[in-house]
Image (cartoon, rainbow, N blue to C red):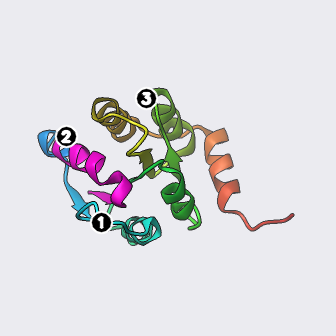
Amino acid sequence: MIALGCDHGGFELMQEVKKHLDEQKIAYKDFGTYDTKSTDYPVYAKKVVKSILSGESEKGILICGTGIGISITANRYKGIRAALCSDCFSAAATREHNDANILAMGGRVLGAGLACRIVDTFLNTPFSEGERHKRRIAMIDAPDEA
C-alpha cells in the first residue's frame, strides 16, 4: 500500500495523483489533508512516516507547495528516505541508488501529467541492491561521529 499525505499547497495535485493511482489499481491510504484550507505540512508528513515505519505502507507520496518542507519533515526520521523529485530521472535514480521510500513533489511546481509520470517511475523502479548503495544507506542511519 502507498501512504499519501499533502497540505493545502499540494491538495489539488494529490487529487490528480489519486485518480492516477485508481486508474492503475494501486492501493493507497490517504492521510489528508482533505481540502484547500490552510494547514501545516508536518502533520501529514508525520502520518505518512508512521505508516511506513509501522509496516502498514510500503512507500509514500508527499506533496506540499514546493515539496521542500514536507520532505525535510519526513527525513528527520530514521529509516525514512524521502526524495524531492521534479523529473523522472531523479525518481528512478533515488529508487535505484537510495532505496527512497517516500516521493515528495511540489504541487505548485509540477503539472499533473509530469507528476503522474514521476509517480510511475518512482513506484516501478526497484532498488539496485548494489553493495555500494547498501553501504551508503547504512551510513545515513549510522550514529553521528562528527
The residue at which mark 2 appears reads as 20
The N terminus - image quarter: bottom left
The C terminus - image quarter: bottom right
How far is mark 3 from mark 2, CA to CA?
A: 16 Å
How far is mark 1 from mark 3, CA to CA?
A: 30 Å
Is residue 4 magenta-colored?
yes
Identify the amino acid type marked 2: His
Q: Residue at x 47, y 68 (%)?
A: 42
The residue at which mark 3 appears reads as 88
Q: Is residue 59 visible?
A: no
Which class describes the residues within 10 Å of circle 3: few (<14), some (14-19), or many (20+)?
Answer: some
Circle number at residue 37: 1
On screen, 89 above or below 13? above
How far is mark 1 from mark 2, CA to CA?
A: 23 Å
Identify the amino acid type marked 3: Cys
What segment is highlighted magenta in the picture?
Answer: 1-19
Q: Residue at x 22, y 43 (%)?
A: 16
Q: Residue at x 20, y 44 (%)?
A: 21
Front position in the image: 2 or 30: 30
Residue mark closest to the camera, 1 vs 2: 1
Of callouts 1 and 3, the N-terminal one = 1
Q: Are marks 3 and 2 in contact (CB under 8 Å)?
A: no
